Amino acid sequence: MRVDKLLANLGYGSRKEVKQLLKSGQVKINGAVVKDAKEHVDPNKDSVTLHGEVIEYKEFIYLMMNKPPGVLSATEDNRSETVIDLLEIEDQVYEPFPVGRLDKDTEGLLLITNDGKLAHRLLSPKKHVPKTYFAVIDGEVTEEDVRAFQEGVTLDDGYSTKPGELVILKSGIRSDIELTITEGKFHQVKRMFEAVGKKVVYLKRITMGPLELDETLELGEYRELTEEEIQILKDYEVK
């Protein structure tokens, strides 16, 4: 990789600005000053410093966000704030994207990465990666609903869902539930409850495959995945 591309990709300026940095003699590769923007560097082997500080290079970035309501699960939008807008600039330079979507008014676990291969594995319909949601339902959720979800329900467009695992946490005029599904149809959780005559009034995703939402994250906050979490995701195979 060219050294100017490396520095630009890591957010140290535009290509033009990076070339000025190089000309100033502030960039070193393995201790030697480098001024040629075309100089090649292996970021996994070579030590690159700027102003005497070692530059940490990573090819991929893996972030867990507790998505707040009112924010789009998209990379950009002309009218609404997106989850990428919530990232610090040093994370945005990796050009990450949300893995799957959460509805604008839905909260909770959202994986953001630039690892396309991993994202494809987690999103592939053939993989049936389970996702668990906590929801508050307007209406009493019953064991009849549990059985209906186990068999799959028919949505408003005639689509029959795959079986879902519905757990009643609290039943009443308003019910608290957890629902695990292996699909990601548009507004699926809301439409599944509409199919049994009930309405979702609050929705939060708490797991995606082996990844669990870090409950210490406030709405809108995010953190990098740990090495262990990344490895678990990469090794994950749906049973």
Image: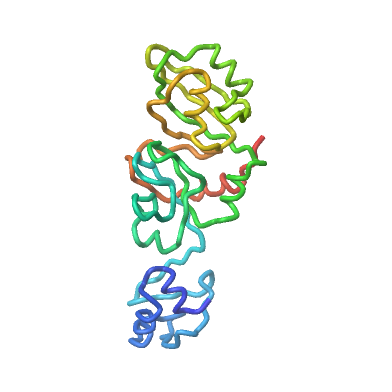
The reply, left or right, for residue 133 in relation to residue 238 is left
Choose between 50 and 180: the one closer to the eye. Answer: 180
State whether residue 32 is above or below residue 172.
below
Tell me which residue sits at (53%, 49%) in the image.
230
- Image quadrant assignment for residue 146: top right
State whether residue 87 is above or below residue 190.
below
Tell me which residue sits at (56%, 45%) in the image.
233
Where does the image place residue 161, in percent across and percent down from the top left?
Answer: 61, 29
Colour mode? rainbow
State whether residue 216 is above or below residue 163.
below
For the C terminus, give its image quadrant. top right
Q: How many marks?
A: 0
Where does the image place residue 138, in percent across and percent down from the top left?
Answer: 39, 19
Tell me which residue sits at (45%, 34%) in the image.
205
- Image quadrant assignment for residue 182: top right
The reply, left or right, for residue 233 in relation to residue 65 is right
Where does the image place residue 148, in percent across and percent down from the top left?
Answer: 59, 17
Tell me which residue sits at (50%, 75%) in the image.
46
Where does the image place residue 130, in percent across and percent down from the top left?
Answer: 57, 34
State whether residue 201 is above or below residue 213.
above
The reply, left or right, for residue 156 in relation to residue 63 is right
Q: Residue lying farthest front? A: 157
